Image (cartoon, rainbow, N blue to C red):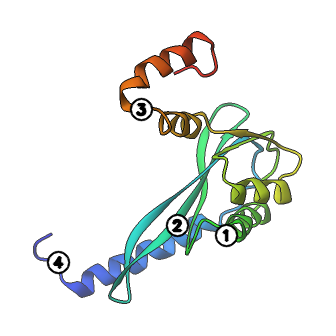
């Protein structure tokens, strides 16, 4: 943007940071979250004049009436079990309750953290991650044939 100074950008960022932090701390006691999706990704960011990799994780919930809501996000050094455990504990501490089904990739970190924090819920592997894993092992020329077989045998519906 033209005509905006560094100090103005800094003030705007500080104001936004306060709003985001307030949102990240809001109570989740209002209504049960019956479905919980968890995902993470690795990003490159600039920190201390260097480019480093960080992990960003997010939790999206669905209420009994079908309303979707982002429940929280966190950024950490790696997508480890300890990081996922800390993230899920923070959601539970804020009041996350009523979870019947948790959907995530099949990495051990989130699976272990789910078992430790939301043990009453059923876990399901994310279909999108499943399909990426399957197709990642297939020759490019065989992708259509494999997808047709999966559809035909109802292993997965697209």
Q: Are marks 3 and 4 in contact (CB under 8 Å)?
A: no
Inter-mark Cα distance, 2 to 3: 29 Å
- Judging depth in this view, the residue of 146 and 1 nearest the camera is 146
Q: Secondary structure at mark 1?
A: helix
Q: Are marks 4 and 2 in contact (CB under 8 Å)?
A: no
Q: Residues within 10 Å of mark 2 (few under 14, many from 20)?
A: some
Q: Secondary structure at mark 4?
A: loop
Residue to which mark 2 is pinned: 55
Q: Is residue 95 visible?
A: no
Residue 139: give its label.
3
Q: Are marks 1 and 4 in contact (CB under 8 Å)?
A: no
Q: Position of residue 38 (x, y in %)?
A: 63, 50
Q: Is residue 142 left or right of residue 77?
A: left
Q: Position of residue 153 (x, y in %)?
A: 62, 12
Q: Position of residue 30 (x, y in %)?
A: 75, 50
Residue to which mark 4 is pinned: 4
Of the residues tagged 2 and 3, which is closer to the observer? 3
Q: Is residue 112 visible?
A: yes
């Amino acid at each position: 943007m033209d005509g905006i100074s560094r100090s103005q950008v800094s003030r705007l960022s500080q104001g936004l940071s306060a709003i985001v932090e307030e949102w990240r701390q809001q109570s989740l006691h209002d209504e049960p979250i019956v479905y919980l999706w968890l995902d993470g990704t690795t990003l490159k960011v600039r920190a201390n004049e260097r480019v480093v990799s960080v992990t960003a994780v997010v939790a999206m919930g669905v209420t009994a009436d079908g309303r979707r809501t982002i429940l929280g996000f966190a950024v950490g050094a790696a997508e480890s079990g300890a990081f996922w455990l800390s993230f899920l504990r923070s959601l539970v501490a804020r009041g996350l309750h009523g979870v019947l089904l948790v959907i995530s990739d099949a990495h051990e970190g989130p699976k272990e953290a789910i078992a430790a924090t939301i043990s009453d819920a059923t876990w399901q592997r994310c279909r999108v991650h499943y399909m990426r894993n399957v197709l990642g092992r297939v020759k490019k020329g065989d992708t259509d044939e494999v997808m047709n077989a999966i559809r035909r045998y109802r292993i997965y519906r697209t």
